[in-house]
Amino acid sequence: QVQLVESGGASVQAGGSLRLSCAASGFSFRTYTMTWYRQGPGKERELVASIAAVVPGQIMYGNSVRGRFAISRNNAANMVYLQMNNLQPEDTAVYYCSVRIPPQRFWGQGTQVTVSA
C-alpha cells in the first residue's frame, strides 16, 4: 500500500532553516509528481511545492514560499525533500507529503514546523 512518511520538522527561530524529508513506498515513485502541502493553525491546507516525476522536471512553488524554499527528489531512493530557508512565523504549520495516484490523493501523517519570532 502507498506509504508516505515525513520527517525533519522542528521548532526554530525566525531566519532559520530546516530540511524536511518524505520517504515513499508502495507505488512506482519515479512515475508521479510529488507535492508538499502545509496547514497552519486556523488556516486551510495550501500547496507549498511540487516536483514532476522526471528530474529535471517542472517545479512549482506557492507564492508565499517562492525564493525561500526548494523542493527536490531522489528517484533512486524514493525520497522527496523540502529545503526551507529564512523561515518566518507564518511558516508555522504541519507539513504534508502527498501524491496523487488517480483517482485518489494520498497523504503522509505530517511533520510539525514551528517558527518563533
Image: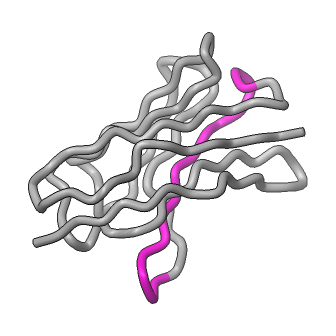
Give left or right: position of 104 versus 51: right
Q: Quadrant of the C terminus?
A: bottom left
Give left or right: position of 114 versus 15: right
Magenta span includes 32:
yes
Q: Quadrant of the N terminus?
A: top right
Give left or right: position of 10 versus 100: left
User: Can you tell which quarter of the image residue 25 is in?
Assistant: top right
Q: Which residue ends up furthest to the front in the rendered image?
A: 11
- Between 46 and 80, the residue placed more toward the observer is 80
Location of residue 32 with respect to 104 vertically, above or below = above
Q: Position of residue 81 (x, y in %)?
A: 45, 34
Looking at the image, which residue is at 33% across and 54% down? 10
Q: Position of residue 23 (x, y in %)?
A: 62, 32
Magenta span includes 105:
no
Looking at the image, which residue is at 76% across and 52% down? 106
Q: Which residue ends up furthest to the top in the rendered image?
A: 76
- Between 18 and 11, the residue placed more toward the observer is 11
Q: Which residue ends up furthest to the bottom in the rendered image?
A: 42
Please give the range of residues in magenta: 29-43
Q: How many marks?
A: 0
User: Can you tell which quarter of the image residue 75 is in?
Assistant: top right
Looking at the image, which residue is at 64% across and 37% down? 33
Q: Position of residue 59 (x, y in %)?
A: 45, 37
Location of residue 86 with respect to 115 vertically, above or below = above
Q: Give the color scheme: rainbow, by chain, secondary structure or one colour.
A: one colour
Location of residue 94 with respect to 77 vertically, above or below = below
Q: Position of residue 61 (x, y in %)?
A: 39, 50
Looking at the image, which residue is at 55% across and 45% down? 6
Location of residue 2 with respect to 77 vertically, above or below = below
